[in-house]
Amino acid sequence: MAGSAPLDPSSPAASEDDRRLVEALRAGDEGAFTELLERYHTALVRLAMIYVADRAVAEEVAQETWLGVLQGIDRFEGRASLKTWIFHILLNCARTRRHREARSIPFSAFWNPASEPDEPAVEPERFLPGDHPTWPHHWNAFPEPWSGLEDRLVARETYTYIRQVIEALPLHQREVITLRDIEGWTPSEVCAALGVSEANQRVLLHRARSRVRRALEQYLREQ
Amino acid sequence: MMDDEQELTCQELVELVTEYLEGTLSPEDRVRFEAHLVTCPGCRTYLEQMRQTIELLGRITEEMIPERAKAELLHAFRTWKRG
């Protein structure tokens, strides 16, 4: 297609697979577009849900993203991977939508763990006090192994519960845990998409996972 | 980061679990982390629960794109192609 940006061959982000898909898309290949839809659409909707809450609006945001992909594909230079680029468009669309709905959007890039209260992974009362003669700061009582977890987890309610726990997380924790643990992104993909440092990404992931573990422990105890 | 002489406490270990799983602990801290695990069943259980939590999160979702959304987007694609 005339006027298309060349893919930078030296860029490690542009894989063979990306190159094939971008060239096919530019040539108007419907199969390539279908392949991308099947690969990423539901993930786009799930990610949009972080920002807009309503599923129908999230679908709209995902559709808007695909239109952005088509409009921008000629300018895609392969400096990021195709996946990162697509999700970057989604984040822009979703955040714009959220903004339009008059909710404030602090970006993760400005998130600073030092400005937030400490958040212990486990409730401090689960440990012996610091002046304990033999075992300071050791478990007061050991956590109970989650036996028979497999059987309980096939239950749909457990997944519904986990979703609710995630929805209740602070925004940035939710962004990171969704991308890392639900969507299976690598740390560098998450940092690139959210504009957050590796170290802050890890702090957010740690807090989010710790909260989910705590919630799960409580849930399994109550069952 | 931590005093080499001192053993890790359980309360310290739970804060290092993510760095341990991410492989970002220093070699010294990794040794202390693993040494603690050998003697502490509570922390072994805790680490296992974190692994189970992560595995569970990874299984939350295996959805397909709804046919209607797909049809609408392919329609948009054909319009784009013509334009």
Image (tube, helix red, strand yellow):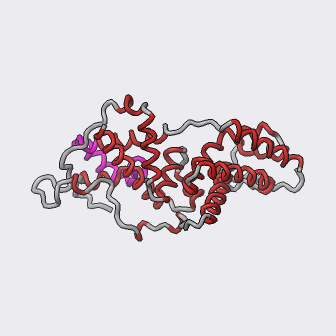
Figure quadrant of the C terminus of chain A: top left
Query: In the image, residue A112 lies at what x, y percent?
Result: 46, 68
Residue that lies at the very extreme toward the bottom in this rendered image: A115
Question: Does residue A148 lie above or below A24 as drawn?
Answer: above
Q: Quadrant of residue B4?
A: bottom left
Query: In the image, residue A32 lies at what x, y percent?
Result: 76, 39
Judge from the rendering whether residue A115 lies leftward or rightward of residue A31; answer left or right: left
Q: Residue at 43% of width from left, 31% of height from top?
A: A154
Does the image show residue A20? no
Question: Does residue A200 lie above or below A223 as drawn?
Answer: below
> In this orientation, which residue lies closer to the viewer: A90 or A198?
A90
Q: Residue at 49% of width from left, 59% of height from top?
A: A172
> In this orientation, which residue lies closer to the viewer: A60 or A9?
A60
State which region is magenta: B18-44
Judge from the rendering whether residue A138 lies leftward or rightward of residue A99; answer left or right: left
Does the image show residue A193? yes
Q: How many marks?
A: 0
| A26 is within the stretch colored magenta | no
Chief secondary structure of the magenta portion = helix
> In this orientation, which residue lies closer to the viewer: A207 or A185?
A207
Judge from the rendering whether residue A200 lies leftward or rightward of residue A60; answer left or right: left
Query: In the image, residue B65 lies at what x, y percent?
Result: 65, 38
Q: Residue at 46% of width from left, 45% of height from top?
A: A163
| B21 is within the stretch colored magenta | yes
Residue that lies at the very extreme toward the left in this rendered image: A133
Question: Does residue B39 lie above or below A120 as drawn?
Answer: above
Q: Quadrant of residue A152?
A: top left
Q: Residue at 17% of width from left, 54% of height from top?
A: A128
Query: In the image, residue B46 lies at what x, y percent?
Result: 30, 44
